[in-house]
Amino acid sequence: MKDRFLVSGGARLQGAVKVSGAKNSVLKLMAAALLAEGTTTLTNCPEILDVPLMGDVLRGLGCEVTIDGSTVTITTPAELDSDADFDAVRQFRASICVLGPLTSRCGRAVVALPGGDAIGSRPLDMHQSGLEKLGATTRISHGAVVVEADQLRGADISLDFPSVGATENILTAAVLAEGTTKLHNAAREPEIDDLCNMLIAMGARIQGGGTSTLIIEGVDRLHPTDYAVVGDRIVAGTWAYAAAMTQGDVTVGGIAPRHLHLALEKLKVAGADIETYENGFRVRMDRRPDAVDYQTLPFPGFPTDLQPMAIGIATIANGMSVITENVFESRFKFVYELQRLGANATVEGHHVVVHGIEQLSSTEVWSSDIRAGAGLVLAALVSDGETTIHDVYHIDRGYPHFVEKLQSLGADIRRVTE
Ligand code: UD1
């Protein structure tokens, strides 16, 4: 837990990296394995801590889980326990995605409330109201959300906001409901499409995956399947911004470039040369980036998870950038760490105004969440001298083999373990 990174800035990143499966998909696909009795095998899973943590949650519900490198095998019994283990669930927010599958399979789900975190309060009202529309009752009791349903029935549901988590829980509850569900204003993130594709491979009837209207015709049962997790667009985007910031030349594999379309377009505006391939892209930059404005929005908008990278590149860009956060209310904490690195960045409500400077100046900084931590590493790569980044366990939760991959691209970074 006490590990830190020491980063000496100045290297131009050069070479090739491959991303593994998306953190924000694998956890939901593992939860979806609850929907079918038998053995589900997931490949291309990222080797990050949240995968074994989700394994613990599933074991607590009665599954057998084995993790062998990038392959996860889950054997789901006929009878599941409906109450998720409090301690296992509390360790990471994404465990809330067992709510839909458990309600489907058991007619009841008890899952500890995840609580707020460094990026915002993150309520569950849309998860609850969606499940209620399907005929469930929901309540908060002793720190957990409790969902009960004799029989889920298809319904017309409109989300106030295209929430990723609410879309997933409603989808995984509706696949085994009686009748047809229409989910309007659904999230369109590639990870939702990935979940739809796995559910379809399990026998679910879903139309509209990747669009804002999902039509789900309930079926009596699903069967287990073998499925490969979609590539991690946020990790791929982090490499793209690292390449551009360090005036490097990096080829990224294992990712469909359309999943990162706007993020790569923004880099082109900043002056990068981008080539795209069927399953990857190359970013080359041979000068100081130009300033670009960003607005985070649900997919296909600019991802909030790449907002720290957008602010990072703005800190060393030529000119002024305005970055607007529209998804999470308090995702700017890491700006204060950037200020300690000398960045000229000011938070104004949900905007950050950044006047680019030529080079940041090394010091000690603390990561507050996965993406902010990765953003600080990128900033350290363009600082003079050696920067110490503390609390890197956050980064380890989202970036498999980050230090080794950065080293392979020529970065001067090392992990110090106490
Ligand atoms: C997921 C991702 C996260 C990403 C986010 C947005 C995972 C594990 N995490 O989080 O990395 O940043 O999508 O792309 O996949 N909200 C409500 N009520 C609800 C649900 C959400 O008000 O019932 C609000 C949230 O507080 C937030 C916004 O809606 O302000 C978006 O949240 P959501 O899309 O649900 O994100 P997550 O699924 O939590």
Image: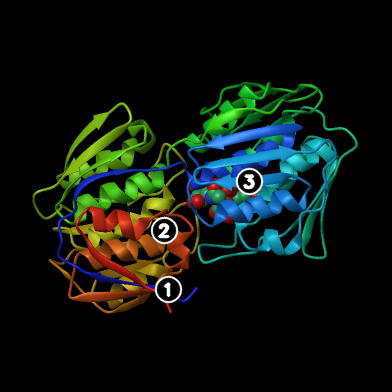
Residue 406 in sight in this render = yes
Q: Residue at x 75, y 62 (%)?
A: 86
Placement of 288 over or under 19, stated as above or below = below
Q: Which residue position is annotated with label 1? A: 3
Left or right of 120 in this view: 323:
left
Secondary structure, mark 2, is: helix
Q: CA distance from mark 3 to mark 2?
A: 28 Å
Nearest the viewer among 177 and 291 is 177
Left or right of 277 in this view: 136:
right
Placement of 52 over or under 365, stated as above or below = above
- Residue 351 location in percent, x, y? 37, 60
Identify residue type, mark 1: Asp
- Residue 133 location in percent, x, y? 78, 37
Q: CA distance from mark 1 to mark 3?
A: 27 Å
Sequence order check: which comes first, mark 2 or mark 1? 1
Nearest the viewer among 190 and 339 is 190
Q: Which residue position is annotated with label 3? A: 66
- Residue 83 location in percent, x, y? 81, 53
Identify residue type, mark 3: Thr
Q: Residue at x 56, y 55 (%)?
A: 50
Q: Which residue position is annotated with label 2? A: 371
Sequence order check: which comes first, mark 3 or mark 2? 3
Give the label, 2 or 1, closer to the camera. Answer: 1
Placement of 392 over or under 274, stated as above or below = below
Q: Residue at x 35, y 38 (%)?
A: 260
The residue carrying pointer 3 sits among few (fewer than 14), some (14 to 19) or many (20 or more) residues within 10 Å by Cα, namely some
In terms of image quadrants, where is residue 63? top right
Q: CA distance from mark 2 to mark 1?
A: 17 Å
Secondary structure, mark 1, is: loop
Residue at far front of view: 68
